């Protein structure tokens, strides 16, 4: 059997990794400023993470959600404390798309409605309602297009007000910092406006923090830069530092009932061990603060490079915009400079999504390499 060929691949085969360093199968070292697409939050093979997962594996990898699993409660408790979201409940699943599916489903159950408001350039995953709320017709199959989603421009209060007053919608879903789309953000004024309008019209506000959450923006959640409180928050990527895990934080005003949501693998013992290890390291090493501080340092350095026309994002979720398409530059960074970076729907944007425990020295190395590649 061969693989179903859906990914254009760089000719690199990572074989081992530590922190932000990755070695390929020929022993060539790379620096990972992409974090495997914003997934690596505490660094590759962090010793505490490895130990926590290994210890759990020695005890038990999995049992179903039909029995008690105190690790889930421990995780919910710790996540509530570190994220200052103690008035939410946690439901665990396995990926970002699945988190958004569950969030949208909750919104639909809660309101009895099915239409969704999403925004231009959004990305929420590749399944059912999540992909329908993703602004990319080429990845929506006819079966997905049955969902009714209205795409609105970000930061257009007039268009938003006009749509929401129709009282047809169950949910508004948005990224506090757009990832795949290219690092555009709602303004605080717009975020507060839509939060108030959602309350007024009993529409569920879903913050998709799959990419921007877990400290990446320099606050635990990126919406926390704007003084609003979403009804549901979806999480994944950095949550497991590479272990496949996702979840939603559901405000406690939503009442659960047996069978409302469910999953076989979500919240399994290994996923909980990985997720707890991530939170413990984030706390012990002050990584949210590090992301904020190093984000500021990165911007200062980026501002010195004349070819960079615009610096987008917050904390260590950064996009560097050039006045040319960056595909060749990204390739040069990998092949010649041995550094991984990310791309976006905006083809002129190079994305920087490293582990949150990088150092100023790592950033200096990145800019030395970038200057050479330019
Ligand atoms: C903001 C956002 N939401 C959802 C997803 C989907 O996550 P997953 O690929 O884990 O399904 C992504 C993935 O890039 C994302 O960036």
Image (cartoon, rainbow, N blue to C red):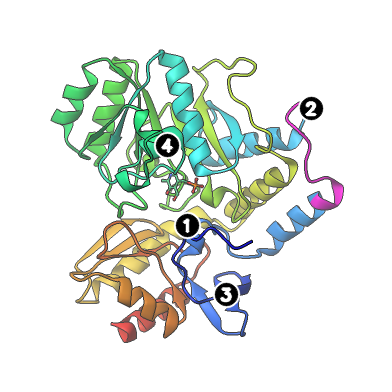
Neighbourhood count class around disc 4 (C-alpha, 10 Å): few under 14, some 14–19, many 20 upward: many
Res 316 quadrant in image: bottom left
Q: Residue at x 62, y 71 (%)?
A: 18
| Residue position for label 3 | 13
Q: Is mark 1 within 8 Å of ligand 1?
A: yes
**Of callouts 3 and 1, which one flags the residue occurring earlier in the amino acid sequence?**
3
Q: Does the magenta stretch include residue 137?
A: no
| Residue position for label 1 | 38
Front position in the image: 252 or 179: 179
Q: Distance between the residues labelled 3 and 4?
A: 31 Å
Front position in the image: 141 or 85: 141
Front position in the image: 275 or 340: 340
Tell me where the magenta segment starts and ends, as one range: 57-67
| Residue position for label 2 | 67
Q: What element carries label 2?
A: loop
Q: Are marks 4 and 1 in contact (CB under 8 Å)?
A: no
| Residue position for label 4 | 130
Left or right? Give the position of 2 relative to 290: right
Q: Is mark 3 on a helix, strand or loop?
A: loop
Q: Is mark 4 within 8 Å of ligand 1?
A: yes
**Of callouts 2 and 1, which one flags the residue occurring earlier in the amino acid sequence?**
1
Q: Which residue is drawn at 33% across and 83% down?
A: 373
Q: How far apart are marks 2 and 3 (CA)?
A: 40 Å
Q: Distance between the residues labelled 4 and 1?
A: 19 Å
Q: Residue at x 52, y 26 (%)?
A: 87
Neighbourhood count class around disc 3 (C-alpha, 10 Å): few under 14, some 14–19, many 20 upward: few
340 vs 96: above or below: below
Front position in the image: 238 or 149: 149
Q: What element carries label 4?
A: helix
């Amino acid at each position: 059997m061969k693989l179903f060929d859906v990914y254009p691949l760089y000719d690199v085969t990572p074989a081992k990794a530590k922190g932000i360093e990755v070695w390929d199968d020929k022993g060539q070292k790379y620096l990972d400023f992409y974090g495997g697409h914003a997934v690596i939050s505490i660094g590759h093979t962090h010793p505490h993470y490895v130990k926590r997962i290994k210890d759990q594996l020695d005890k038990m990898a999995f049992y179903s959600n039909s029995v008690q699993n105190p690790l889930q409660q421990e995780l919910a408790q710790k996540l509530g404390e570190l994220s200052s979201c103690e008035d939410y409940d946690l439901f665990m699943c396995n990926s970002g798309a699945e988190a958004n599916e569950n969030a949208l489903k909750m919104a639909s159950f809660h309101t009895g409605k099915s239409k969704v408001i999403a925004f231009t350039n959004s990305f929420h995953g590749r399944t059912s309602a999540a992909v329908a709320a993703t602004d990319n017709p080429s990845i929506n199959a006819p079966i997905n297009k049955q969902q009714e989603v209205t795409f609105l421009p970000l930061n257009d209060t007039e268009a938003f007000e006009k749509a929401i007053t129709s009282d047809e919608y169950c949910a508004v879903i948005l990224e506090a910092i757009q990832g795949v789309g290219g690092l555009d953000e709602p303004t605080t004024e717009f975020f507060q406006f839509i939060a108030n309008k959602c309350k007024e019209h009993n529409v569920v506000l879903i913050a998709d923090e799959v990419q921007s959450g877990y400290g990446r923006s320099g606050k635990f959640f990126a919406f926390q830069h704007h003084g609003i409180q979403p009804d549901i928050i979806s999480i994944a990527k950095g949550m497991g530092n590479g272990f496949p895990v996702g979840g939603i934080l559901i405000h406690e005003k939503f009442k659960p009932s047996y069978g409302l949501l469910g999953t076989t693998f979500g919240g399994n013992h290994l996923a909980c061990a990985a997720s707890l290890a991530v939170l413990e390291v984030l706390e012990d090493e002050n990584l949210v603060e590090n992301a904020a501080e190093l984000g500021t340092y990165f911007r200062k350095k980026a501002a010195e490079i004349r070819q960079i026309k615009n610096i987008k994002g917050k904390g260590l979720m950064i996009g560097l915009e050039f006045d040319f398409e960056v595909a060749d530059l990204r390739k040069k960074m990998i092949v010649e400079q041995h550094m991984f970076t990310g791309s976006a729907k905006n083809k002129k944007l190079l994305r920087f999504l490293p582990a949150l425990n990088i150092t100023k020295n790592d950033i200096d190395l990145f800019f030395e390499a970038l200057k050479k590649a330019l």
